[in-house]
Amino acid sequence: MEPLGWGGIFARMAIQFWPVWAALIVTFAVSIHQKRKLGLYGKLFDSPIGMIGFAIVMFWVFTALFADLIITQDPLVQISSMKNKPPGEAAPEGSSYAYYLLGGDNLARDVFSRMVMGARRVLAIAPAATAFAFMVGITLGLPAGYFGGRLDTGLSFLANLVLAFPVILLFYLLVTPEIRDTGIPIILAAVLFIFPVIFFITLFNSRYFTDPPKRNLFIGITLVLGLWAYSGLAFNMDPLGVWSMDPNLLNVFVAVVFVNAPTVFRIVRGIVLDLRSRDYVAAGQTRGEGAWYIMLWEILPNARGPLIVDFCLRIGYTTILLGTLGFFGLGVSPESPDWGSTINDGRRLLSIFPHPAVVPAFALMSLVLGLNLLADGLREESLRD
Amino acid sequence: MLMFLSRRLGIMALTALCLTFVVFFLTNLEPNLEKLARSEGSVRMSDDQVTSWLEANGHARPLIMRYGEWLGVLPGWTRDVDGSVTGRCIRGGLTAETAPTRCGVLQGNWGQSSVFKRPVGEIMGRSLAATGWLMLWVMIVMVPSALLLGVLAGMREGTRTDRALSTVAIATTATPEYVSGVILIVVFASATAGISPVLAEWGWISGRTLFQGTATSAMDKITFWNFGLPVLTIALYGMGYIARMTRASMTEVMTAQYIRTARLKGVKFRDVVIRHALRNALIAPFTVIMLQFPWLLNGVVIVETLFNYKGFGWTLVQGAGNNDIDLLLSCSVVAVIVVLVTQLISDIGYAFLNPRIRIS
């Protein structure tokens, strides 16, 4: 068969992405129709920049969700005749799709399918790692800003300590096969993963402690679910075997959370320092409300604007960090289709066969750009009221 | 001011001490030392031999003592086996009598690199000089263009210029170095793709590519063609962030009372921007530029690896990848010092530039 031209390649790719287009159209139609009822999310559709950003982000989210439908070839299968072939080359008889849409890489795998599967990989880790970093940062930043004093000095010193490390050095020290033997990632995971449980327990306790039955119910649920997931994720000892994490992945995950948490801590602390002197906080104190109630149910909701914006930006930053890890070949298996390690694989032959590295590079860039635009739109809209 | 300075310096020293200890701990973990023993001694050593090698080379003692020796505050270890004395400080022609008691970082002894088989101090000096050139050019390219971009975008908020320039700034911050580097190489330094084949066909360039895809030759002689791409790669990523900060600060200044007064007085818009707004608008970006150094350090590591430029970042990767403990330790000391010093400069500079801040 003849190789495809660029027009044919793009047309075929657009067809492959049909579940994504369908999902995007439904999302946008529903959201724009209902935008007055949807709060900050609805207001996003008033800002063109925010909408573009949201569309790009959702494109990749849906790509990750429907990756199995989109891929044209198995991302791990090697068809030796397709090694380093340019985009649009026809695949030999018997393979699952007639073409290698974006060519083959140096191990003769389909670049297009690997890029699509890479989206799943990146979007599975980056938001989750960011969420954990936020849990840690919020749980520590609130009391540091609210109480101040020794606690604040100590925690700030620790945060600055981590921040003074160049990130790559920290990765080289934390994400190595040797360090896994010493159990340091597990200790770090044990410390970092307990924070969400602490966060939700204090959250429910401060809210419902006047209503013991309800409080006990909520805290009971948190404890059971939280500790169940905790035992599985941090120690890989889930009795039912539902929660577990590959040790490689755990190492990467912990390192990324560890790098991000201090920055979140500083942001939360700064916001709390600002909000602490507001009248509604003084009113709460006069009413005799508990410190944690004020922090979690009065200050935190009022800090949500900047935190949501930073959350979007930080997912982008985490994606970049994951790419950096992949670029240096740290903590990922060589088979993994994630974008950073694909770029790393492709760069050796970059000046002769550019496509294996350029495709994931564009994918990563567009996702991060989308998140940045989304954050920009959200910031503009949240400042408006 | 003196109180502030001494307090800051104290905290800095404490931070540096903590960080170097953490790095020392992480690089001297049990598996790392075993690997070191096998690579320095012999690959086929049994576990007992590894243990005795570690003992003979002073690695088998408490961590805190080894850290003290490395730092140079504790006397180096000595070991007397049947009359022949070995020790941390006894080498390179020195005997037990002539060797100094302490030899650590504070005495200027950075150790021996196991990859390059040379003193770490010498390697660091050469690679830091190389990276210094890179940083210098990055700064020369990045800072003026970022400030210009930010000031142009921020001086008339909400206009089309502002929108366009802000989007450019966002796009560059969304493109990490390993992405922009790859794209730049493909566009400008690939013999099969990008613009080089076209230019070569037209006979505009004599070589096969416009720019060179590696910067190895820049170690001897820096030219535009071998240094342009690495500098541009780092500068692009940092530029967007500084430009956005400058824009934010510029828009804030442009709404200030004294700008309106100047405008109402009939001062030309250009003069208002240059004489009145610019100075005040550049206070915030100064801190940002200073705090950008640690980020540049990341960029340097990526770009030097990508372009094969043998500077600090490349050395760090070599040290980390080959379990070269002394080299990695020195790299982290340098990195940590760079970060801490720039933080200090940004604090002090901010106080000097902004008359509203008084340090007591």
Image (cartoon, rainbow, N blue to C red):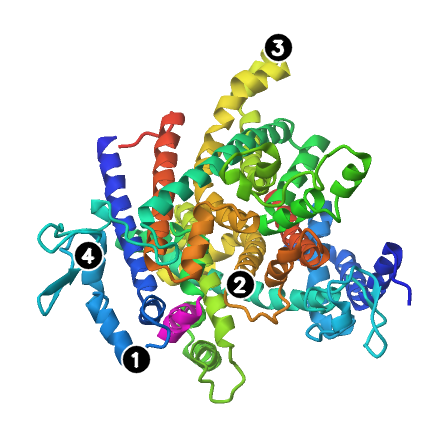
- Magenta segment, which residues? A176-195
Give the CA separation, mark 4 to mark 3: 67 Å
Could you tell me residue A355's position as x and y percent? 72, 56
The residue carrying mark 4 is B68
- Asked whether residue A61 appears in the rendered view, the answer is yes
The residue carrying mark 3 is B266
Q: Is residue A170 left or right of residue A11?
A: left
Kind of residue sitting beneath label 3: Gly
Residue at image location 71% in from the left, 56% down from the top: A353
Crowd class of label 1 (few under 14; some 14 to 19; many from 20; radius 10 Å): few
The reply to whether discs 4 and 3 touch (Cβ–Cβ < 8 Å) is no
The residue carrying mark 2 is A329
Give the CA separation, mark 1 to mark 3: 84 Å
The residue carrying mark 1 is B47
Precedes in sequence: disc 1 or disc 3: 1
Crowd class of label 4 (few under 14; some 14 to 19; many from 20; radius 10 Å): some
Kind of residue sitting beneath label 4: Gly
Helix, strand or loop at label 2? It is: loop
Helix, strand or loop at label 4? It is: helix
A189 in the magenta segment:
yes
User: Dominant secondary structure of the magenta stretch?
Assistant: helix
Kind of residue sitting beneath label 1: Asp
Q: Which chain carries label 3?
A: B
Q: Which chain carries label 2?
A: A
